[in-house]
Image (cartoon, rainbow, N blue to C red):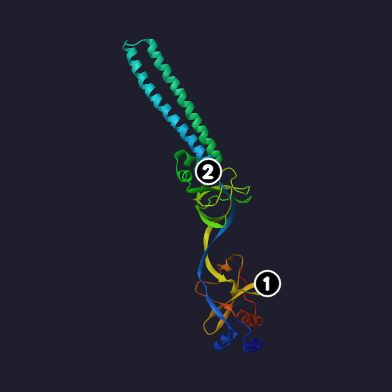
Amino acid sequence: MLLVALLIAGQAAAGPITIGKAKRQHAGIVLATLQASRIRQSIRALGVVLDPAPLIRLSGSIATLKAQVAAAKAKVVLERQQMSQASALYKGHTTSLANYQKAAEDLASNQALLTDAQVKRAAQLASTKATWGAVMASVLRHDGEPLPQLVAGKAILIGLSLPPGTTLASPPQHAEAEVAGTRIPLRLIGPVPGRLGRYPGQSFLYQAAAQPGVPVGTTVSATLPVGPQRKGVLVPGSAVIWRDGHALVFRAAKGGRYQPVRIATKAPRGSGYFVVRKLHPGDHVVVRGGGVLLGLLEHTPAPPDDD
């Protein structure tokens, strides 16, 4: 208290607080240099590790229907060739009407089989799209990634959903999730019409590398970044001094001057706060000894608001 009283005696009524080197050392003032930082707004999603077996079976069904369509097409091509030959022979009076009619009936029969196979395949694909979304339907249709990895046990599927009333027009291609206490990177497959995660909201399907000891049904918590990145600085929590319900930091300048700066604390990050205004990378702020400066500040006008 004696030190504070001595410092106050020579302090001006307004402007930055100025104290000499000896008094700064006696007050134990320590500075830290602010580093550039970036932040993006994020939404918390809650999900689950999905069983890949239904999708693998569905892929097999789609492949079977695809093969049936291909076989039916080949049969129709063959029957058309035979029909063309039968027609030429019949016109040349070298085959009977019965043979000509038999060729026509065989062609019509195989065309009907082709149409039936195509309808079944289209219905299966439409059902898959309605359940798993357009992207996953395309993956299953073409046996694309991550299907081979799922079959080999090298990848897992994670279904995430958003809280009710929250939507994302463009879900992030990459995100980070916490699974069984481990943080893992996720890669987007695509949006899903139905509910996959723990929230009854918009759902997305992500993939990740296989995680040992993480069974199907494990709860997943993920942070989905949204919006543009914002540039700012990370202010250590030890630099923040509270005055009249507002957060202040003391920015150091040449000549032993300390400028009080009011900051917003709406973006806590780790052991500090992400700040986008008034402070800049390279600024020096007080991280120890701020209480002494606060005592001096009580005899000066409050700094302007950050808003």
User: Residue 129's spot in the image, x, y percent?
Assistant: 53, 39
Please give the residue where the numbered disc 1 appears in the rendered image.
245
Marks counted in the figure total 2
In this rendering, position of residue 184 left or right of residue 75: right
Q: Badge 2: how crowded within 10 Å, few (<14), some, or many (20+)?
A: some
The label on residue 256 is none
Q: Badge 1: how crowded within 10 Å, few (<14), some, or many (20+)?
A: few
User: Residue 201's spot in the image, x, y percent?
Assistant: 61, 48
Compared with residue 192, is residue 117 higher up or lower down, i.e. above or below?
above
Q: Is residue 261 visible?
A: no
Q: Nearer the viewer, mark 2 or mark 1?
A: 2
User: Residue 261's spot in the image, x, y percent?
Assistant: 59, 75
List the single residue furthest toward the front. 213
In this rendering, position of residue 34 left or right of residue 307: left
Quadrant in the picture for the N terminus = bottom right
Q: Which of 144 and 305 is in front in this view?
A: 144
Compared with residue 138, is residue 85 higher up or lower down, i.e. above or below?
above
Q: How far apart are marks 2 and 1 (CA)?
A: 52 Å
Could you tell me which secondary element the residue under label 2 belongs to? loop
Could you tell me which secondary element the residue under label 1 belongs to? loop
Question: At 44% across and 23% down in the image, what residue appears?
Answer: 111
Please give the residue where the numbered disc 2 appears in the rendered image.
52
